[in-house]
Amino acid sequence: MRNDKKITVSERTSAPMLNEQPKNGGINGFFAKEGTQSVLASLVCISAGLIIGFIVMLLISAFAERMSIADAFSGLAILVCGPFSSGSLNYITTNFGDMIFYAAPLILTGLSVAIAFKTGLFNIGAPGQFLMGTAGSLYVALSIDSRESGTGVAVWLLALLVGMICGMVWGAIPGLFKAFFGVNEVIVCIMTNWIAANLVSWFFSEKTNLINTGYGKSGYLITTEMTGNSTPKIGLDKVFSGSYIDSGIFIAAAVAVIIYIVLNKTIFGYELKACGNNRNAARYAGMNEKRNIILSMAIAGCLAALGGAVYYLNPGIEFAFSSAYSKLPDYGFNGIPVALLASNNPVGVIFSGIFLRYLGQGGDNLTSAGFNRYIADIIIALIIYFAGFSKLIRDLINKKRQMSMKKTKAAEDNSGAKKDREA
Amino acid sequence: MTFIIQKTLVYSIPLLIVALAGMFAERSGIINLALEGEMIFGAFIGAVAVYLFQTGNILVEHPQIMYVVAMIIGAAAGAVYSLLLSFSAVKLKADQTIGGTALNMLSPALVNTLALTFFSQEKLVMPLSTNFVLKNEDAGEFLKIFIDKAYISTPIIIILFIVLSVWIYKTRTGMRMRACGEHPQAADSVGINVDKMRYLGTTISGALAGCGGYIYIATTAGGTAESTVAGMGFLALAIMIFGNWKPLGIALGAVMFGFLKCIGAVSSSIDLLKNLGLPMYFYNIIPYFVVLVVLAFTAKKSGCPKAEGIPYDKGMR
């Protein structure tokens, strides 16, 4: 791909400079790898975000009443420790389990955005696809009562499947519009988001048997716990007692690996990326670029929908259907930063998803230092802002590397010349 | 009739001005995905201004002047906020989609943090003691649309829209700005400072978006500034694409969208629609659906600026 080619070119130009050094060995070779550089760039972004977040906390503690500068330091400590900042061991395991649970849908929506990015499409429609997946899977899981029949796992799988199909259809719409009418996918995604939000609210408002009529509940659906079709917990709830954790994270991780393999090891994945890099060249090479656009969006929709399904099939999570039409789910939009932080690498998405939740969990614990949890959101936004400069940072690393290489070479030459003179 | 036109305008005006904001940035070559964030930020700062005016007893006798001043402050806040985007996109040549996404995330977080720190809740409700609605019951039928039971922002924004549209098409600076969105290398070769033009375009964009955000919360959202403007920024972006990056198309799109929204809002008071017995969700869907259908038939010829989203690189000449 385009990036790979760039590396080979730079390797070729730098190879004579390296002379006796093996091409990929040594510390310089380590820093020459694209993966290392992405990780390094991400680390720089994260540190910069944390530093500015700390400055924000300093400012707040200076201006707000009843707060001292010391609060800013404890606030930073809490953020950096994430789920581990929650006091006793019991709380820590609960917090950690919650972090894993909330990370799973994030990873899936992140993958959804990432695969669309790889095909040169901006999938801002993840919230709508997420909602369609939620609706499809919840409708199946809540309509069938399997507490007595014991078919919980089968219904659960069916629910996942139906949710994915709903999202796939919904995601394909922007793809179809883009491929056949030439409509910018961003605008179609925005429109379909709000259509989905209203459809979902409308659909469930008429399914009165699925609405939770319990005391003090209004606008919520019943949970999968009440029908016995929830995501299996495979004993994780024993380890992380009191948390929401279920096996969703394994689904997310497995899907990420599958997407990685499809993108990097199959012809289909190659075609997707080729369409993203240069649509005209891909068509010239005989690839069906329209089909690839539609398929890419359909897969993206499928992944975001799976995120919704995994999130809401948990026994403890309730779906507030009556307010769905007025606010799009954050999980959909938060897939964008997850994908960006991972530079759209499917395996990287696993780590960036967990990392963003790690910070979020720290943010939730911030109240103990007198701050509100939105400080974590500020820091995440700043990290993404700096992630935009990652190419700049990578260039800087490369420059440094080449400078140091030149220096060592010059030093070697000097010493060599000296030796010659001495001889 | 007057009522429906007024209601349509109330919905259309924020969309109109924010879509124009998007156009200004994109015509200069910067994709301003951060419209939503700029709206939220401008709205909040505008609301803070109103709050300070009222607690400080400034301009309370002249609510209209206070409203306009808050509008200008909101615009200034949006402009300052947009500098974050133009700095990363122009100076550091960063990816504009990433920058815009980051700013869209940053401003709700900032607003929530500031509101919680200084007002102890996640929103700031502008006190209703000051009524911004104009009252001129004895005006003529046509004038009534703009000055009776209406907001002063409506005529101001319409005039501003026309002035800015003429400006970007007819003046030297406006044409130079558009050139930077179409072919910055050519523009640079005749001595136009591309970076400066792009800074200018994004800053105007931010100011308009901030102003639009304030108008949105002051008119449709009941004076509540919080961490969301209900997707109006993205909607405006869609209206801009719908309008093919041209003022006339944007005006058409915004008014059409406002009208469809207005039909949904008044559906319960019109007997004909009431008898159909359709839920409000149906009317909520219509505007989005209509935009999609219209786009499917009209989108083939796109007026998208050629160089938008591509950082300017002198070496590419």
Image (tube, helix red, strand yellow):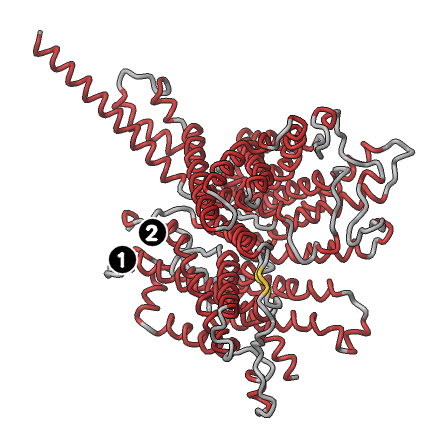
Closer to the camera in the image, B242 or A359: A359
Q: Is residue B61 left or right of residue A248?
A: left
Q: Is residue A286 above or below residue A27?
A: below
Mark 1 lies on residue: B188
Horizontal and vertical percent position of residue A126: 61, 47
Horizontal and vertical percent position of residue B153: 51, 75
Q: Picture quarter containing residue B165?
A: bottom left
Going 60% across and 40% down the picture, which residue do you hit? A364
Horizontal and vertical percent position of residue B51: 52, 66
Mark 2 lies on residue: B312
Label 1 resides on the chain identified as: B
**Where, quadrant-wise, is the C terminus of chain A in this rendering?**
top left
Q: Is residue A59 above or below residue A187?
A: above
User: Is residue A362 something one can see in this rendering?
Assistant: yes
- Residue type at the position of mark 2: Tyr
- Residue type at the position of mark 1: Asp
Closer to the camera in the image, B45 or B175: B45
Q: Is residue A158 left or right of residue A119?
A: right
Q: Could you give the CA–CA distance between mark 2 and mark 1, rounded to whole angstroms?
A: 10 Å
For the residues bearing labels 2 and 1, Cβ distance under 8 angstroms: yes
Q: Secondary structure at mark 1?
A: helix
Q: Picture quarter containing residue A349?
A: top right
Q: Picture quarter containing residue A109?
A: top right
First-in-chain label (2 vs 1): 1
Q: Secondary structure at mark 2?
A: loop
